[in-house]
Amino acid sequence: QTTTISVIKADIGSLAGHHVVHPDTMAAAAKVLAEAKSKGILIDYYVTNAGDDLELIMTHRKGVDAPEVHETAWNAFKEAAKVAKELGLYAAGQDLLTDAFSGNVRGLGPSAAEMEFVERPAEPVVIFMADKTEPGAFNLPLFRIFADPFTTAGLVIDPKLHDGFKFEVYDVIAGKYVVMNCPEEMYDLLALIGTPGRFVVRRVYRKSDNEIAAVVAVERLNLIAGQYVGKDDPVAIVRAQSGFPAVGEVLEPFAFPHLVAGWMRGSHFGPLMPVSQRNARCTRFDGPPRVVALGFQIKNGRLIGPADLFDDPAFDEARRTAQVIADYMRRHGPFMPHRLGPEEMEYTTLPAVLQKLQNRFVESKLYQVKGPKVKTELLHD
Ligand code: F6R
Ligand code: MG
Ligand code: MG
């Protein structure tokens, strides 16, 4: 018999701008999940938040993409959004893009990371939840967890990991995916996932037996909605220990606060700061982007925990570094590379501003560019 973990999240409105989820909305969502548990749809659940994102962590026996589970999540978000509207929370109902639910939350605003497996005698999982960034933010840490021997000692010294892992990379623009083996295809993999706005690590499998090791929610809301409706603050589930990287190997990449896209108005690069759950709230310049890690043991579908894994002085230095980087990046103000490049800015509110400047440009005869036409995205297309 298999157990499925579904982590489904949505921003249904928050307190004082896009800062933090209100406890009453979490309570409303938890009530719906409690009902689903009493009906036997769910085995267990845990409701939490990362900044302004409401996070539903659920276990059940119904597999990935189960309509009943997705409907439960959808109803929980609906109820939470109702409360958000009553309280006049900011951007109430933001991520619920439609009224017509049809069996699956994908494409409707919320995003989901789900994995199904046969429980090991002891089954540790780490659930990462980030705010003010995008799914590709997990590319670098997942690569380092599952393919970098300088991070994961087990790749070298544990025969159960030594064969390596397979990465399923999803092209969010084309809607296609490719599976690549590591270590053999490491350089090809990096050629793709070094562009995290487009190529996103969606799943990782252990190569020796195809066991699922990690899964990321890859929905990109702006691409779905066709306009800026907030960043696609992602979640990821990673299995750990006995044949998978140890919890400490899974957390290790986050000691380096790498630059990710998101932050203010979903339009800036900034460091991903690992924080405790209580500090998963975005203040400075609506950030900097943050990530929380909750550890659970799964037993007969029950969620034992959580352990708040970044609530540890061992990550203080990463947080301090993140603040130094935040200062440095902020001093660029509206300039790239703090502000995102033109391709990514297409999904923000910038095109509306540039549109108005369109007619101000006059033909410049004197210094026309010869040869191939220079592409000036955004402005003249
Ligand atoms: C980023 C985010 C915030 C908002 C910003 C402006 O993901 O949610 O940085 O983009 O606070 O918000 P609005 O447009 O709602 O005033
Ligand atoms: Mg928000
Ligand atoms: Mg958010």
Image (tube, rainbow, N blue to C red):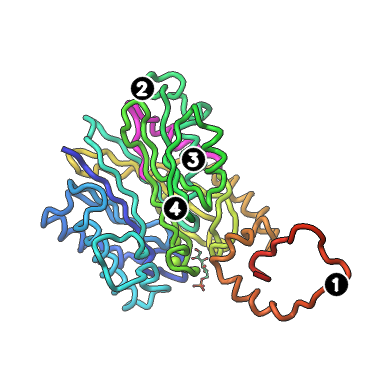
Question: Which amino acid type is marked by label 1?
Answer: Lys
Mark 1 or 2 closer to N-term? 2
- Extent of the magenta region: 237-256
**Camera-nearest label, 1 or 2:** 1
| Disc 1 residue: CB within 8 Å of ligand 1 | no
Mark 3 or 2 closer to N-term? 3
Q: Name the residue under label 3.
A: 141
Question: Which amino acid type is marked by label 3?
Answer: Pro
Cα distance in 3D space between marks 4 and 2: 30 Å
Q: Which one is in front, 366 or 304?
A: 366
Q: Name the residue under label 2.
A: 160
Q: Name the residue under label 1.
A: 365
Cα distance in 3D space between marks 3 and 1: 49 Å
The stretch drawn in magenta includes residue 379: no
Q: Residue at x 41, y 45 (%)?
A: 202
Determine crowd level at label 4: few under 14, some 14-19, many 20+ residues with C-alpha closer than 10 A: many
Tag 4–tag 2 contact (CB < 8 Å): no
Q: Which residue is drawn at 22% across and 53% down?
A: 66
Question: Which amino acid type is marked by label 4?
Answer: Ala
Quadrant, the N terminus: top left
Percent from the top left, x then y, of residue 377? 65, 64
- 111, above or below 115, in the image: below
Q: Element at badge 1?
A: loop
Q: Element at badge 3?
A: helix
Question: Which amino acid type is marked by label 2?
Answer: Lys
Cα distance in 3D space between marks 3 and 2: 21 Å
**Camera-nearest label, 1 or 4:** 1
Mark 1 or 4 closer to N-term? 4
Q: Element at badge 4?
A: strand
